[in-house]
Amino acid sequence: MEYPKFIEVKRDSDTLTIDVQVIANCCHNFLGEAEVVGNDTLNLVYTSYGGFCSCACMFSLRYKFDTTFEADYHILNCVTINGSEITGVIPKKD
């Protein structure tokens, strides 16, 4: 299995929730942020930091966004993780 990977991408009303799994050092914590790339791609960025252990663990990360801005801006269609080639599809708003 290739990591990072998308677990779920879903919309609830004006909230977009994206769950991903990553493999990182077991002693690390994470900083998360996001950026829009091009006109329609959301790139989720995570940075791991902390002490060093001699093991690697699977972590689940959740990103939540208020999507009320989409009425005034471009609609996001795709999502990537740290600029990887792995792409998820963002469901359309109802």
Image (cartoon, rainbow, N blue to C red):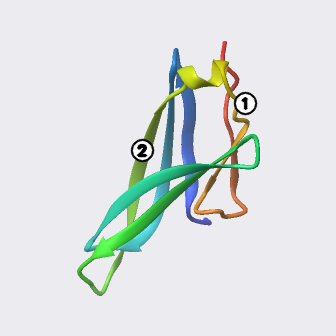
Residue shown at the point (34%, 62%) measured from the top left: 30
Residue shown at the point (72%, 30%) measured from the top left: 74
Residue shown at the point (58%, 24%) measured from the top left: 69
User: Hey, which quadrant is residue 93 in on the image?
Assistant: top right
Is disc 1 surrounded by few (<14), some (14 to 19) or many (20+) residues within 10 Å?
few
Q: Amino acid at mark 1?
A: His
Give the SS element for disc 1.
Answer: loop
Give the SS element for disc 2.
Answer: strand
Q: Residue 58's spot in the image, x, y percent? A: 40, 64
The residue that label 1 is drawn on is 74
Residue occupying the far front of the picture = 72
Residue occupying the far bottom of the picture = 54
Q: Amino acid at mark 2?
A: Arg
Q: Nearer the viewer, mark 2 or mark 1?
A: 1
Q: Is residue 55 left or right of residue 6?
A: left
**Which quadrant of the rendered structure holds the N terminus?**
bottom right
Q: Residue 4's spot in the image, x, y percent? A: 55, 62
- In the image, residue 43 above or below residue 23: above
Q: Nearer the viewer, residue 51 or 45?
A: 45
Is disc 2 surrounded by few (<14), some (14 to 19) or many (20+) residues within 10 Å?
some
Residue shown at the point (48%, 33%) measured from the top left: 65
Q: Residue 8's spot in the image, x, y percent? A: 55, 39
Q: Residue 83's spot in the image, x, y percent? A: 65, 62
